[in-house]
Amino acid sequence: MITFKNITIKFDDFVAAKNLNFQVKDGEFFTFLGPSGCGKTTTLRSLVGFIHPAAGRIYVDKNDITDLPTEKRDIKMVFQSYALFPTMTVYENIAFGPKVNKANKNDIKQRVHEIAKKVDLNEKQLNKKVSELSGGQQQRVAIARALINKPSILVLDEPLSNLDAKLRKQLRNELKSLQKNFGITTIYVTHDQEEALTLSDRIAVFNDGEIEQIGTPEEIYEHSATKFVCNFIGDNNQLTPLVNKYPQKFNQLKLDEHTEFYSRIEKLKVFSAGQPFQLTEDEISFEGELIDSEYYGIYTKYSIKVENIVIRTILTENIPVDSIQSQKVTVVLNQKNILQYA
């Protein structure tokens, strides 16, 4: 169990993290998510020992590690740049930690081969220089080097950001599988919402040095606690002008002049002209006009003008259209799916 208690981090007069209080459970995949400069990497570095907090304490289990040097914290870090030794072989990179700890040579060899197999590195790759490997293979080497000494905690700072989109998705799955297999407590830093949602057991959403919400991916997405979380996670429609114009239609919402209303784009239904549909007691409909479409293969994103606002939605089945600009449609909103923020 990792516990941050009243942690504040400062650089001169600048407060990078403000009064952080949270816990990470044993064996959990816990993600720090937020935009650049929000304090997530700074918080991670305070756990590792690279930064000392101005106030508060950090505990692992019941042990206060706040003042412990980095090398005594039993925490291993995988950096964004991987921080490998390019002139060494893969074997030498992975074996570096045990060698420093003066482990037996035969024991080192056995451990290197065991960990290499778990991260899908073969004998041929072990004998290559790190500089000869692809980005994805280098990332596996960095993880293997971090895990070979069996740390109690693994931290990863944007480890996939240097890879192309296809490889990132592939390695996400591998990362999660590795973490489950090792059962190691893992803290992961990213600005990528999709990455956080697919990998994490729980997510802490950072904004301006503070945590706005902690929860499971489903809680963060379906029940965003603040307007910032709502807008940072996923794609939304801003419905406030529509709600304010037709308050009688939105009879299930708590209407207030200072409240803003949002809906995830995939929560909407769209029906083309003449297509039959039936509303439930929670649903309301508006007439609109298609003004644009973007085809993504497995779905199409549509932009629809309703009154004076543009509403976007995604559909897995294309709306039959002759001319996108002249196509009339009906947009259906479920009031239970509308998020409200004062």
Image (tube, rainbow, N blue to C red):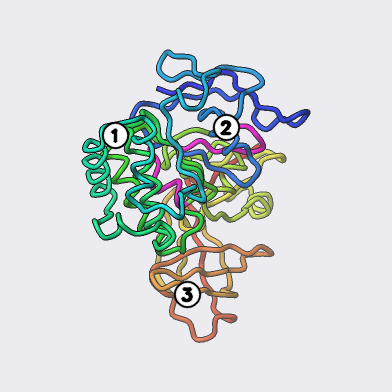
Q: CA distance from mark 1 to mark 3?
A: 40 Å
Q: Position of residue 77 (x, y in %)?
A: 46, 38
Q: Residue 98 placed where, x, y %?
A: 34, 35
Q: Which mark is residue 127?
A: none
User: Which badge, 1 or 3, is on the more N-terminal residue?
Assistant: 1
Q: Secondary structure at mark 3?
A: strand
Can you tell which of label 1 and label 3 is closer to the viewer? 1
How many C-alpha atoms fall within 10 Å of the one at disc 2: few (<14), some, or many (≥20)?
many
- Disc 1 crowd rating (10 Å Cα; few below 14, some 14-19, many 20+) is some
- Residue at 52% across / 70% down in the picture? 302
Q: What residue range appears in magenta?
A: 194-210
Q: Distance of mark 3 from mark 2, alpha carbons?
A: 40 Å
Queried whether the magenta region covers residue 331, the answer comes back as no
Is residue 173 found left or right of 272 in the rendered image? left
User: Who is closer to the viewer here, 8 or 264?
Assistant: 8
Left or right, residue 80 beside residue 141: right
Residue beneath disc 1: 183
> What type is the residue that disc 1 sits on?
Gly
Q: Secondary structure at mark 2?
A: helix
User: Which badge, 1 or 2, is on the more N-terminal residue?
Assistant: 2
- Residue 169 seen in this snapshot: no
For badge 2, the amino acid type reads Thr
Residue at the disc numbered 2 = 43
Q: Quadrant of residue 63?
A: top left
- Depth order, front residue of 38/150: 150
Q: Which residue is mark 3?
A: 295
Q: Which-is-in-front pick, marks 3 and 2? A: 2
Q: Secondary structure under badge 1?
A: loop
